[in-house]
Image (cartoon, rainbow, N blue to C red):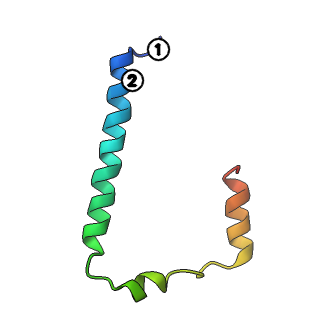
Amino acid sequence: MGQPSFAASNAIVYLTYGAFLVVGTGVAWKFRSQSKGEFLAGNRTQTAVPLALNFIASGE
């Protein structure tokens, strides 16, 4: 299997961008009635140890 052509590569990239745009817009539309306070209440809900393990597992 060889590399895809330049046009095919661009098509994959831009279709992926488009999919992320559609999903992000859908999630925003779903939560549009949520107040700013409710959104911000989700901050600091994960303790330090699981957060650190997630950071390590991500390879960053």
On screen, residue 47 versus residue 38, left or right, reads right
Q: What element carries label 2?
A: helix
Question: Residue 9, position in %: x, y?
Answer: 39, 23
Q: Quadrant of residue 55?
A: bottom right
Q: Which residue lies furthest to the front in this view?
A: 36
Q: Which of marks 2 and 1 is nearer the N terminus?
A: 1
Residue drawn at (58%, 82%) of the image: 45
Mark 2 and mark 1: Cα distance apart in space: 9 Å
Residue 46: horizontal and vertical position, in percent?
A: 62, 78
Q: Residue 38 carries which label?
A: none
Q: Does dot 1 land on a helix, a strand or a loop?
A: loop
In this view, 21 is above or below 37: above
Depth-wise, is mark 2 or mark 1 nearer the camera?
A: 2
Image location (x, y in percent) of residue 19: 31, 46
| Residue 59 vs residue 14, the one in the foreground | 14
Mark 1 crowdedness (10 Å alpha carbons): few <14, some 14-19, many ≥20: few
- Which residue occupies the extreme top position in the image? 2
Q: Nearest the camera: 42 or 37?
A: 37
User: Which residue is found at the position 33% from the left and 58% from the top?
Assistant: 24
Taking 54 as reference, is 46 above or below it?
A: below
Please identify the quarter of the rendering in which residue 57 is found. bottom right
Write down the residue under mark 1.
3
Indicate left or right for 35 with 53 as reference: left
Q: Position of residue 28 (x, y in %)?
A: 30, 67
Q: Which amino acid does label 2 sit on?
A: Ser
Neighbor class of circle 2 (other Cα within 10 Å; few <14, some 14-19, many 20+) is: few
Q: Name the residue under label 2.
A: 9
